[in-house]
Image: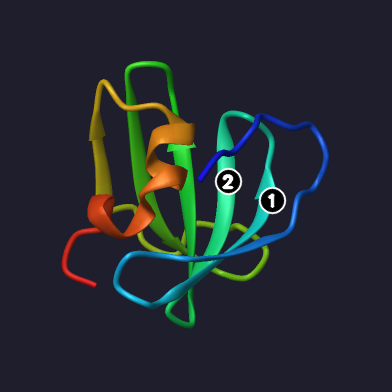
């Protein structure tokens, strides 16, 4: 699966390895909003780590405790294998 950085809103529907669909709603290269398993998540890349936070459908973080991601990861890496980077789905 390949994702490219975009300044426009991209909408892609993919299937993850566990059969749960992920929908990429928006990706600006540093932050992405996805719908996965009926829940929205904001993925944020600050240059040294990429973290996943619960969000609402507008991309507002609803809880600041990260639920996935890690250090030395890029946004594209997390998007490319989202289910493996999400903790305790």
Q: Earlier in the sequence, mark 2 or mark 1?
A: 1
| Residue sticking out furthest to the top | 47
Q: Is residue 16 above or below residue 49?
A: below
Residue 75 appears in the rendering: yes
Q: Is residue 57 above or below residue 7?
A: below
- Asked whether, in this view, residue 23 is left or right of residue 77, the answer is right
- Asked whether, in this view, residue 61 is left or right of residue 60, the answer is left
Residue 66 appears in the rendering: no
Give the residue drawn at x 83%, y 39%. 8
- Which disc, if any, is residue 26? 1
User: Alpha-carbon neighbours of circle 2 within 10 Å: few (<14), some, or many (≥20)?
Assistant: many
- In the picture of the structure, the residue carrying the numbered disc 2 is 32
Give residue 54's position: percent from left, percent from top: 41, 63
Q: Tell which of 69 and 58 is nearer to you.
A: 69
Give the residue drawn at x 16%, y 68%. 88
Marks 2,1: beta carbons within 8 A:
yes
Give residue 75's position: percent from left, percent from top: 46, 33
Alpha carbons under labels 2 and 1: distance apart: 5 Å
| Residue sticking out furthest to the right | 8
Q: Is residue 19 above or below residue 71?
A: below
Q: Tell which of 83 and 60 is nearer to you.
A: 83
- Asked whether, in this view, residue 3 is left or right of residue 19, the answer is right
Q: Tell which of 78 and 30 is nearer to you.
A: 78
């Amino acid at each position: 699966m390949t994702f490219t950085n975009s300044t426009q809103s991209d909408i892609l529907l993919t299937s993850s390895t566990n059969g749960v669909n992920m929908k990429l709603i928006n990706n600006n290269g540093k932050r992405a909003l996805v719908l996965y398993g009926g829940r929205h998540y904001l993925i944020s890349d600050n240059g040294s780590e990429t973290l996943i936070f619960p969000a609402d459908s507008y991309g507002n973080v609803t809880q600041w405790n990260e639920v996935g991601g890690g250090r030395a990861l890029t946004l594209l890496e997390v998007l490319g294998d989202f289910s493996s980077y999400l903790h305790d789905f």
